[in-house]
Each structure stands twice: as structure tokens, then as C-alpha cells.
Amino acid sequence: MVGPEAPIEVREFPEPELEPGAALLRTLASEVCGTDVHLWHGRLPEVPFPIIPGHINVGVLEGLRGEILDLDGKPFREGDLVTFLDVHETCGRCWYCLVAKATTRCPHRKVYGITYSAREGLLGGWSEKIYLKPGLKLLRLPAGLTAEAFIAGGCGLPTAVHALERAGVLPGDTVAVQGCGPVGLWATALSALGGAAQVITLGAPRHRLALARKLGASATIDITGLSSAERVEAVRERTGGRGADVTIEATGAAEAVVEGLRMTRDAGRYVIVGQYTDSGAVSLNPHHDLNRKHIEVRAVWGIDYAHLYRAVQLLARWTADLPLADMLTRRYRLAEAGEALRDVENLRVVKAVLEPAAG
Ligand SMILES: [Zn+2]
Ligand SMILES: [Zn+2]
């Protein structure tokens, strides 16, 4: 990705030399995430174009220099099927790492596929091979979890895991989910798995809402043609007029935030996860929308290793029961990356996956 709105180019790079502690991954699958579309639209500042996008990846370890151990102390081997946390170089020494314990806000944080330039190496997944820097946090897929099933969870699942951690859904709660892209779909599934009595998913287009129902939504609301007030009313009429106990925003549209506050009950909780890139400003009434509602608002920035780890464990447990094949609408070869990006941009697919090893 050479710059905002510029055509995607395929470029050749030399095979990298491994420094001590580094490894090389042969990429089996890399997601084309909504964030990649936002990057391409120039909505995230300070992206060092040209970049190799692809922040959620899975592949086969092809080379290692020195010993790299997993969480259980077992060494990684060539041929292992692994993923890794895209976030790298969180320092463990700064105020945010040590005091706030919020590594996602560490100022030294770097992200594969987003904050590394292609000039720095193969540091993104839209590439036949990915250079795994020393200290990168790898995760071996458990037996029975395929690369395909993992990428069906993709970026949306660990992001939704983080959102659910912040949401604190209790058994019997009613959860409203705004948005039915991958994050909204996984927030729907996790709410249902976590014991919500009702999960109401709002979004469009229809094929995504149908998938939301397969993943556990008890009701879906097609937002096409509905006013903001009508959407709020649609949630209220399913909740005794009160609104949802917990609402999770996963839309990427700034206007959705005011609407989400209003579809949440008084003294409920609102979790904002869909504003990873800048979608503009909105105005709200602090008296009506915040204080008087006695509402708790929480926001989510990125993921840490725990969210990726939990996502992988959950997928391994439920892989046969979840409609994972339905998440993966289409696979693309590397040369088709531009087309994949446009398909995600225009919501023609639920999830687009690049398969660089396929040529
Ligand atoms: Zn730090
Ligand atoms: Zn993503």
C-alpha cells in the first residue's frame, strides 16, 4: 500500500537474513480488515507509507534463529502453525505499561501491517513471508484449530474479546450490538456464548444480519431506511421500554455513538470499540445522554496478547459449532489485494482473506 487511495502494488523484496531471536513465517492467510480500508483512505495519522498491510496473520514457521519459547516453555519448531500478536515493542517500562497496566497505550508500541514501513522489512501479512522480529509474541494454534478457522475469527474476534472484557455482560443481560461487520458479529457471538438472554444486533446488509442470527443474535434490526430515533425505539420496545443493559458499538460511524447511548438503559453500560480510526465529531447532550442516565461509558483501543490468546482458545473449543465457513466470504491471491480491499470497502464480503502462499 504505497499511499492513501493509490493502487495496491506487488513488489519483490530480498529474502531477509534472520538476526538472533528472529523467525520467518510462510503466510497461509492474512486478513483484509476494515482498518486496512481506513488506512487506505488516510484515516489513521502517521502511517509510514509504503506499508505491507496485514496485521492478523497465520502461517508456518519456516526458519528460526536461536531458541524461541512458547508460554509453557516449549520451543517453537520449523513447521509449527502459528499466529502472533501484531503489537510489538510495548516496553514494559513506561508509565502506561507499569502503572496504568494498559500496554495498548504504550508510546513505544509498534504494529505489524500498520506502523512499520515496507522499507523496514517484511513486517505485514500481505506478503508471502513475514519477518518475525525478536521479542514478537508468537502463539501456536492448538491441535484441531486450522489456519482457516483461525482467520475466520481474524481481527474481529480478539477485538470483540477485549470489548466483552470491558462490557462485563452478566447472564440474563440484554445486549445490543451496533454493527454487523466482523467485530459486531463476534461481539454478538461472545455475548450469546457468555449467557446474554437477548442479543439484538443492528446493522446491514441483510446477509450479515443473517450471519448474526447464526452466531447467536436473538433479534436483528436492519438499519436501512430507519431513522436514528426509530433504531433506538426498536431496541427499547424489545426491552420493556428501558433500553439494553449493555450496548456495544462496532460501527466505525461517529453518529452511532449518540444513538448507542440512547438505546442503553439508565445505569447501563456502553462500550465503544468501532472508532479505531477518525470518523469525525458528533454533538451530544451531556445532561440527557450521560449524567441523568447514570450511564457507564468505556472505550477499547486495540488488543493485547491476552485477547489473542483467549480468542484462539475459544475458537479451538467451538470450532465445530460456529459457522466459521460463512465468515470467510472470499479468498484472494496476493495480486488481487486491491480487489479484496474494494470488496471490504463496499461491504460485498463479510471477511476477505489473502492467501499469499497460493501465489
Ligand atoms: Zn510501555
Ligand atoms: Zn484489524
Image (cartoon, rainbow, N blue to C red):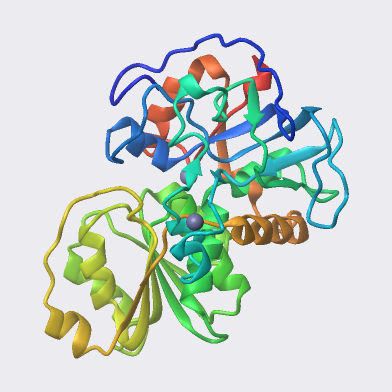
Q: Is residue 205 above or below residue 2?
A: below
Q: In percent of the image, x 68 and y 45: which residue is there?
A: 150
Which residue is more in the foreground, 197 or 56?
Answer: 56
Identity of the residue drawn at 61% across and 47% down: 85
Q: Residue at x 40, y 50 (%)?
A: 206
Q: In which image quadrant can residue 67 be found? A: top right
Figure label count: 0
- Residues 300 and 153: in front is 300
Residue 5 rendering spot, x and y as whole percentages: 28, 24
Residue with the most extreme front position: 93
Residue drawn at (76%, 42%), measured in percent from left and top? 146
Residue 354, placed above or below residue 323: above
Looking at the picture, does residue 167 appear above or below residue 292?
Answer: above
Can you tell which quarter of the image residue 72 is in?
A: bottom right
x, y percent for residue 2:
37, 19
Residue 231 appears anywhere in the view: no
Task: Give the percent coordinates (x, y) of residue 173.
Answer: 49, 84
Residue 265 visible in the current orientation: yes
Q: Position of residue 197 (x, y in %)?
A: 53, 82
Q: Quick check: 289 left or right of 115? A: left
Q: Quadrant of the C terminus?
A: top right
The quarter of the picture where the N terminus appears is top left
> Relative to the observer, which residue lies in front, 43 or 200?
43
User: Would residue 35 be found to the left or right of residue 136 on screen?
Assistant: left
Q: Is residue 48 left or right of residue 139?
A: left
User: Where, by quadrant of the figure, is residue 289 drawn?
Assistant: bottom left
